[in-house]
Amino acid sequence: MNKYIFGSLLLGVGMLASCSLDENPKSAFFEKDAMQSETLIYLNTVAAVYNNMGNSQETTGSDASNFVSDEFFIPGRLGDWVDGGVPQNKFTHNIVPSHGSQGNWSTIYGTIAMANSAIAKLEGYSEMEAAKNYIYELRAYRAMLYYNLCDVYGNCPLVTSAEQSVADTKSSPRKDIFDFAVKELTECVSHLAPDQSQKSGTYFGRMTQPVVYMVLAKLALNASVYQLDVTQANWSKDYLGTDMTGKEQINEAQGQNITNLMKAVNLTIDGQTMNSLEATIYCVNKLEKDYGYKLSPSYTENFAVTNENSVENIWTIPNDAVTYKRSWDHQRRSWHYNHAGHSTYKGFSSWNGPCATKHLVELYGYTEDRQDLSTCDPRFEYNFYIDRDYVDETGVRVTDGFNNKPGVLDTELALEYLPLWSCVDMSNSEAAIKAKKPALYSSFTDDEFFQHVVKSAGARFRKYAFDFTTSDASYPGNDLVVFRFADAKLMRAEAEYRLGQTAEALQEVNDTRARVGLPALTEVSLQVIGDERQKELAWEGTRRQDMIRYAIMNEPTIDRYEGVPVNVSASPYKQSNMDGHTYVWPVPADQIATNSNLSQAWGY
């Protein structure tokens, strides 16, 4: 396949070893040589900036989106992943400034600094058309990074010059970060290539026009939240939910109030001024009509080992073990040790970590152990390993880690994933787990069953096809999907519904359901759209944003409730503490320590 941009990128990184973008070049002769062709200009500016982001989408950035939501958590499995209570505190919304967001902040601002330096360098070659175009590409990429900062942290430094230092810059209000991102994207978009970024070729993995319109759609749909100053007390009061039943019901009346806030925010895109809901629809229409994005015939082909030619993926992060080494470890973080450790999977290590919540499992229609999956939403099995179904890939079974007899028979405790048995902390749930032992385990003691649950509870990550050809589990051939059209289509459905276009919204929802063979619905609501988004987009980092818009972010669930058992090193969920301040992550403690100009978010 012709995936060559990030292969060239590696050459650029090697050249940059002698000429840092953050410093003046040691030799004017070197810079002249390095910038004498369009290819070399790209390698020594744009490519290096893309490469600097590495795998930040996979680690702390992913945690900030996934583990505070109702989709995933990392159960305390008697010694596994307790980590001083930090993973559990993320899920119970007991977040503090030292909770692991430093890496995300530092990586993004480090990349912004490189972009600023590259732009300054390119301005010295502005007589070259390529240099001017690369400046627009870098500005657009930098704007997308500021969208991420605006979304996750709210108020933060706005650094746009190589002469500025983050360590000396004051925080800018969230609205200013939002306005800057929109302005930069709208000014740059016409100067970018119209190519589909997810496809192999010159613009593979790069900022192109459709990627910009997808980011603008995200900014537009969440614009009412991004207008708020997170340093002000009770800044999120309009987005606080009131349903304390644990059933996560979206309140339509409150939804209408939020809709009114959305209508009050205007964006100007391509010379047209629209409210934020109209802007969302406009951008998604562009993706569909001008750039040809649509739903892939198959849900799973978007996450195949060779997913470069998906007609649905909009922006992906290239990755493989040879040329595009930008690792992601979703699979290994989630799987039981003996799953990835089996010879069929080349003996790769795995960490027995994140799994689906019971809320999400039941949303897909799975309500009893070893259920007939034909009664569930098909996307459950597309996204998760369930029961023993990973055997279908390998033709073998392995043990659960506690029953290591030489041969694995049906009568032994073989490894199987137990979707309905996950909980925040196993050590404080032993009695309850033993008491609920199902009849299908009656031949085993309560202790044996409990040990089985401890290491096997929870549906595990399956979304991407396993790359059996890779030589390194961190570098599979699947490119990591950041944006795809199903997300955009359901964003448009929500905007249409909020504008009273219920027939159009219902059709959008039914289109996504039809793709996986589900029957059409006859009615639509915010609850229907929210549920459809969660089932369609699991593991894709969209749920936190959605829960804020639906005013259910801090509400109790069947997994997270007052009195839920937690590890002694973690803090319990308390409804009285759910005031909305955890809708953003705190400015990291190490950044506050080095820059007194930074404004910490309220509540931290």
Image (cartoon, rainbow, N blue to C red):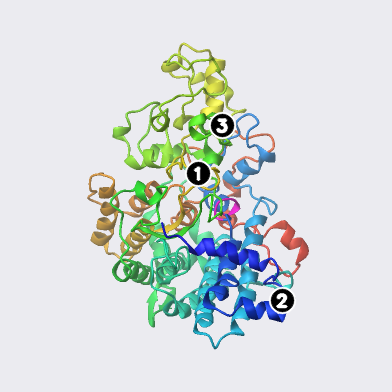
Which residue is at the front of the view, 408 or 359? 408
Kindly state the secondary structure of the residue where label 1 is placed.
loop
Q: Which mark is residue 273?
A: none
What label does residue 470 carry, if any? 1
Give whichever of 406, 448 is nearer the camera: 406
Q: Is 279 included in the stretch rendered in magenta? A: no
Quickly name the residue at label 2.
Answer: 25
Q: Residue furthest top?
A: 443
Q: Residue at x 67, y 39 (%)?
A: 83
Q: Position of residue 400 (x, y in %)?
A: 53, 24
* Residue located at (29% from left, 34% from top): 375
Q: Are marks 1 and 3 in contact (CB under 8 Å)?
A: no
Q: Is residue 323 above or below residue 277?
A: above
Query: Which SS type dominates the magenta stretch?
Result: loop
Q: Position of residue 58 (x, y in %)?
A: 55, 51
Mark 3 element type: helix
In the depicted structure, whether residue 97 falls above or below residue 50: above
What is the crowding at mark 3: few (fewer than 14 residues within 10 Å), some, or many (at least 20)?
A: many
Which labelled disc corresponds to residue 337? 3
Residue drawn at (65%, 43%) of the image: 86
| Residue range (magenta) | 57-61
Q: Nearer the viewer, mark 2 or mark 3?
A: 2
- Tell me if residue 58 is in the magenta stretch: yes
Mark closest to the chain's N terminus, 1 or 2: 2
Query: Badge 2: few (under 14), some or many (20 or more) residues near its Cα, within 10 Å?
Result: some
In space, the residues marked 2 and 3 are separated at their CA atoms by 48 Å
| Residue kind at label 1, given as amino acid type | Thr
Q: Is residue 560 visible?
A: no
